[in-house]
Structures are given as structure tokens and as C-alpha cells.
Amino acid sequence: MRPHLSEPSARKTGRLALPSVLAGLLAAAATPAAAEALHEAEVVTAWNETLVETAYEVDQWATLLGHRTLAMTHLAMHDALNAIEARYEAYVLDASRTDAHPIAAASQAAHDVAVAAYPDHADRFAALHARLLEDAPDDADIERGLALGADAAAAIVEAREGDAFDAEVDPYAPESAAPGIYRFTEPHDFAAYMEVPHAEPFAMRSADQFRVPPPPALDSEAYADDLNEVKALGARDSEERTPDQTHIAYWWAEFCESWCSRLARNLVEERDLDKWDAARLFALLHVDNFDGYVTNFEAKYHYAFWRPVTAIRAADEDGNDATTSDPDWQPEMVTLPFPDYPSAHAQACHGAAAIFEDAFGTADIAFTMDSATAPDEGPATRSYDTIHEAAEDCGLSRLYNGYHFRFAIDAGAEQGRERAAYILATILRPLDTAPE
């Protein structure tokens, strides 16, 4: 992570220009709020929901743009609020503005980062910003809050300049067609996200900091056991997979960046977290999400291990007497176009679970939630007693849909837990526990 900027240093870049639609906000905000009062942390949850929707609309998480924007937005909101009341370590902007309005500061910070990332959606962001400021009736406090939020946004934008999140890299070209080496999976003729390991992490020291150990040897018993398991449970219309396992496969197909944001919004409102704690929770979740993909894809392309669909069809090449090929085998869901090991889905889910446990002080977070990918058959929601039970199902979904070997899921889960523990130990720490 980059060093903190002092308050004057952050201001050197200037504030990001506000759209003209905001010109009358200060006057409008001085009148009594016409809308229903916001819940305590709505300034945080509303921006999160809007940016998740925008990121999905723009590229359906096909690049790091949405992940980067969400991490930057919530870090800027955290720093702005923390300047008003310091509870945690600052990320970039280490300032003190105790007389600034918190809603104005947090919303301005989010607005400016959002516009910088998605300028074509500036009107959408301006409308949300205006709505949130309706609940902020003090002129002077608002003006100071807007200035603070703009400085927090400028600081994080400056800190992330040149972070190579969209680096141009050569397309994937396997060194050989040897058994175990990743090959394109139908219907794809490319490998995605090769640029991801080149991005600068938000908290990790390097992309390879949490590189997992190698996958099992092709001629090992462990490899054969896991190939035969995914061959049976991950096959299209498998008769060995239970109806509940099939439901898990589809229900948990939704990317972590979407469902963990939705769960966080629900829990923040249900448990009445205030702005400060909510801003830190979302910042940690999205830093973990971004850094998780950086370290996970570094390992994926380092090992370049083949997918189950390739391995099962070419099992006569693996030198293992306990495996047999099935050239017609199909996974339950179309395999994504990048290497198998370790599972990105598992690392993201288990990393998020660790962040939730830290935020609420327990893993016993019971919840019922819907999913954007819930199948037509079966319930629209699933219920869990603990966040780690949910993470287990999230990871195993990639076995049941035929994407991953179990060893890739297990390695991804461990990578996610280790990375999240590191992030929690190094950034945004409570001031009463952080080292001097």
C-alpha cells in the first residue's frame, strides 16, 4: 500500500470538478428534508449499491475496473469519516476536520471517485449525491464536509495513479500441450484476466505474497480421487449430485463482489451499524476482493493447471491408472476461460467471511438471502447459521458445477483466509489496538 498523504499533500491535486447539477445543493440542503430520514449508514450502503449496479452494467465484472472503483470509493469514504472522528487508521488521507458534516463528506468522497471511474454515469451519481444531502441541513457543516470528501477522493485517486489495473499483456500461450497444462475450454479460444496479476494491490506487499503450494501430481492418489469426484458430481445432469447440491451450484454462481456487498448492506441496516463502522467494513471487503483476485490469478497463471473438463476428457494422458477418460464429458455449467488452480471463487468467499467475522466480532452471523443466480427450481433464498458455513457452500458450488477440482477449492479457501488475516492485521486497524 502507498504511504499516507499529509493533508496539504492531498490537496495539491485539487478537488475533482462537481457537475453543474450540484450547484444548488448547499442552498437546497438548508431547507427541511422532504424525504424520509436516512438510516444511520445509508450514505455508505446507497453508494455501494449504486456502484455495484454500475460496475455490473458496464462490464459484468469482466475487468478490474469495478473492483478497483469499489475499493477506492469505500476507502475514500472511510478516510473522510475518520477525519471527522478518528476511530481507525487512515488509509491515505490522514487529516482532522472535526467540524465537517459526515454525510456530506462521505457522499462527496464517493461521488468524486465514482465520476472519475465512470464519467458517463455522472448524472446518476449526482442524483444520488443530491438525495443523500437532503438529510444534511447545516450550511457551514455541509460546505466543510464537501471539501473534506473532495480531498479524500483526490487523495485516493492520486494514490492509485499508475497502478496497472488495466495493464496490456500478451495473450496466453501455453509452453506446451503436456498433460496438466491449461488449455482453452469450449466455447472459448482465449484466456481471461491475464492482466490481473500485474495490478498493484491495495494492502498486500506483492501479487505472489499468498501464492499457494503446487497442485497434486497427476499420478498421485489425491489427484485421481479429486478428478473422479468432480467427474461424478460436476457432470451435466449428474445422477450422483443431490438436488440440494445442484441448487448450491447455481445459487452460489453469483460473483462474491455482488453477494457480499448485498449481505453487508443487509447486515449493516439490520444491526444498525453507524457510518464509521459501515465504511470500514465495506472498505475492507472490497480491498480484500481486489487483492484476492490479484494474488489468485498470479497463482493461476503461475501453475497454469488444466480444468476438469480438459483433464477428464484427456485422462488417458495423465499417467494415472486410477483415472479413465470420457471424451464426451460436459460440466454442469460452462467453464470460465482461465486456469483451474486455485479457485478464485473459494478464495473470495472465504476472504469475505473473515472480514465479516472481524466486523461483527463473531462467525455466528445467521442470515437468509436471495441470489441473482438462484435456479428456477428450488427456493429463491438460502439460510445459514454462520458466515463460514456460507463460505463452504460458496466454494463447493464450483465442484458441483464442474468448474474445479476439490484441491483447487481447498487451496483457494486457505489463500482467502490467509490474505484476509493479513489485511485485517495491516490496514484500517482500530486506533486503540494499532501499534504506535
Image (cartoon, rainbow, N blue to C red):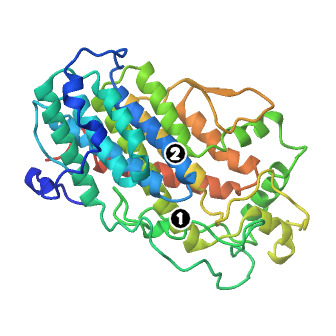
Residue at x 59% of width, y 35% of height:
390
Residue 350: x and y in percent read: 52, 45
Front-lying residue, 413 or 36:
36
Residue picked out by circle 1: 297
Confirm whether residue 155 shows in the render: yes
Residue 187: x and y in percent read: 77, 65
Q: Is residue 6 left or right of residue 374?
A: left
Q: Amino acid at mark 1?
A: Phe
Q: Amino acid at mark 2?
A: Glu
Q: Is residue 237 left or right of residue 72?
A: right
Residue at x 50% of width, y 26% of height:
365
Residue picked out by circle 2: 257
Residue 278: x and y in percent read: 35, 32
> Residue 283, located in which quarter of the rendered image?
top left
Which mark sits nearer the N-terminus, 1 or 2?
2
Q: Is residue 430 left or right of residue 178?
A: left
